[in-house]
Image (cartoon, grey):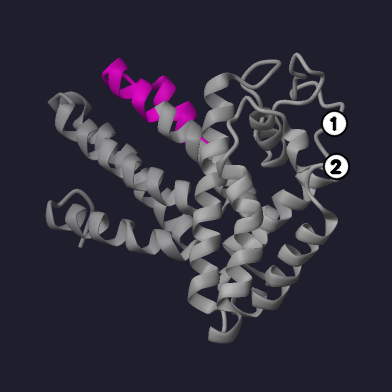
Amino acid sequence: MENTDPLSRFTSLIVRLHHEEYLNQPTVPRLANGQNELGAALSYLTGRMPSDEAFSDIETREDYISVIQLGVEAEKFIEEVSPARAKDRNLSYFRAISNKLLNCAPNTAAQIFNSSNLSKEAVNRLEDVAANLSIFAEEKIIAEEEIEQVILMIDDLISLIRESKIDPRLVSALLKTLGILRMEMSRINVLGPEVIAKNIDILLGQGIRTIFAASDKERKNAIDLFTRFVGLAALTASLVESINKVYPAIEMGMRKLGWIPE
């Protein structure tokens, strides 16, 4: 299976911005000056499905922040794996573009990254750095069928929770977390696994709170639900190395408490 890394993912997004692949998309609105909104362009390019006919301001801000965080991870990657003699050059080529993104806001024009405002040479230099350092990539590109398997498990959990009789406030929180997981799993090969690992951790914590908030009558169902959360964590951990750090301690605690067999 092919490997990837944060720099390769970041570079791919910049190249697509440069080529203006967001043009004529109904979910990427035009600003008063006739150009397209950067935040919406990033939401489209990262594969977000809008909750309505267009991306909300919250969605575009979230995706802008996610791309900024991807840039942070990409810079760390350059610093960690670049040969000493090439590190400063690699960082300067990268920062020439990443700083441009940092100086923007989600409601500015996406065309600031097109060929009229960002030279082809600058983009080519970034692509060369990403290609040269890709030999150090350790993350796996996840196959679509494996992604679909996780999404189907999330969909089953969403249906189960909607039909449950647990506290409506807990239901709302669980559905929100599972919705985020579903979205981020669908674009894990674009933005990476960091948000997924974070929200698996959140989901397991919410599952524990559900158990302790359950009545005696509902406790068995709450434990069964949490066990399914652990199963989701185990499945995602089999695909994403960083999640391996999250779920084993929770599972061990469950066994010690007698919630699942030793």
> In the image, what residue occupies the spot 68% across and 32% down?
38
Residue 159 drawn in magenta: yes
12 to 216, vertically: above or below = below
Q: Position of residue 166 (x, y in %)?
A: 28, 21
The C terminus, quarter of image:
bottom left
Give me the disc on residue 116. 2
> In the image, what residue occupies the spot 60% across and 29% down?
106
For mark 1, does the 10 Å Cα neighbourhood hold few (<14), some (14 to 19), or many (20 or more) residues?
some
Q: Would residue 219 appear left or right of 82 to someone viewing this image?
A: left
> In the image, what residue occupies the spot 35% across and 50% down?
230
- Mark in front: 1 vs 2: 2
13 to 155, vertically: above or below = below
The N terminus, quarter of image:
bottom right
Q: Which residue is mark 1?
A: 23
> In the image, what residue occupies the spot 38% across and 63% down?
244
147 to 111, vertically: above or below = below
Q: Which portion, as a residue range, is magenta?
A: 155-174
Where on the picture, by quarter, is residue 52?
Answer: top right
Q: Secondary structure at mark 1?
A: loop
What secondary structure predominates along the stretch shown in magenta?
Answer: helix
Q: Would residue 141 appear left or right of 131 to someone viewing this image?
A: left
